[in-house]
Image (spheres, rainbow, N blue to C red):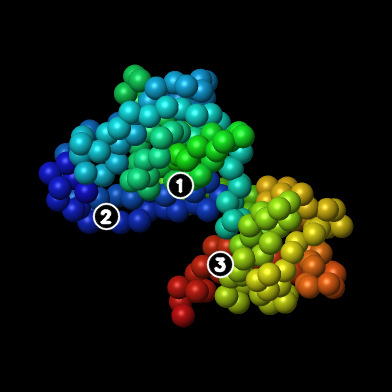
Amino acid sequence: MLPSGELAPVKVLAYDYETGFGLLRTAADVNIRPMELGSSTGLTPGERIVIASYGGSRTARPAMFAGEREFAGYWEYLLEDALFTVPLYPRFGGAALIAADGKLIGIGSLAIGDAIDGEQTVPGNMFLPIDLLKSVLGDLLSEGRSSGPRKPWLGIYTEEVEGRLLVQRVADDGPAMMAGIKPGDIIAATGGKPVVSMADFYRKVWAQGEPGDVISITVIKGADVHELAIRAADRYQWLNLQHSH
């Protein structure tokens, strides 16, 4: 959406599941000066920043930087240095996180309930750090995704419940479904090593190989424990197959 409120058609140039960044290009010249990229490192908790989204200057809101920490997403996603802000900003998707010097330091990703994690959690937002975009921007422009090693993908969507990793759903015709993993199963271990969190699960799966390799998963189904072998896939290839149906 342009400052005038007019919608501009765009073309998708890239999307990278490893980082969560995507690139769009408008179909015509919109005569807008791009925002200068700043640095997402060295921010101090309590620092004042601004969040702005589609809809023009009226969407700009003051906010506070809550901190930087690891973020694990249920869709087999792990971000080492996510940025967290408060209070909750409703138009978070693709929103600009702006430093006091007017430079772009993050891109809006999610609304979360624990932007400040403590005895009393505080809702807010998670932003992708702009320094991460800098590291993959060349790849996104030339390849449509980052060129780093491809991680093995299982197609498991999980949730941490009382210290256990519970399977919420599995991707249709994905590796986990084909191996017999079902919603309600509890993931106890992978590669023979106990799993203690979502992030821990991802790291231990990714350490076992790459797409096409066999990943060992120990799951609890009711009162039974099962050792399953999953032939990991490439997430991008699976998505292409799904879109071709």
Tell me if residue 87 can be seen.
yes
Mark 1 touching mark 2, by CB under 8 A? no
Q: Which residue is mark 2?
A: 10
Mark 1 or mark 2: whose residue is earlier in sequence: 2
Q: Identify which amino acid the numbered label 3 is placed on.
A: Gln
Q: Is residue 231 left or right of residue 36?
A: right
Q: Provide residue 47's location: percent of width, then percent of height.
A: 44, 21
Q: Is residue 125 above or below residue 158?
A: above
Dot 3 alpha-carbon crowd within 10 angstroms: few under 14, some 14 to 19, many 20 or more: few
Tell me if residue 204 can be seen.
no
Q: Secondary structure at mark 3?
A: helix
Q: Quadrant of residue 114?
A: top right
The residue mark sitting in front, 1 or 3, is 1
Q: Is residue 105 left or right of residue 198?
A: left
Mark 1 touching mark 3, by CB under 8 A? no
Is 18 in front, or is 186? 186
Q: Identify which amino acid the numbered label 1 is placed on.
A: Leu
Q: Which residue is mark 3?
A: 237
Q: Provide residue 126's location: percent of width, then percent of height.
A: 48, 40
Mark 1 or mark 3: whose residue is earlier in sequence: 1
Q: Quadrant of residue 61?
A: top left
Mark 3 or mark 2: whose residue is earlier in sequence: 2
* The disc label shown at residue 110, or none: 1
What residue appears at the point 38 percent right and 29 percent down from the top-left corner? 63
Q: Secondary structure at mark 2?
A: strand
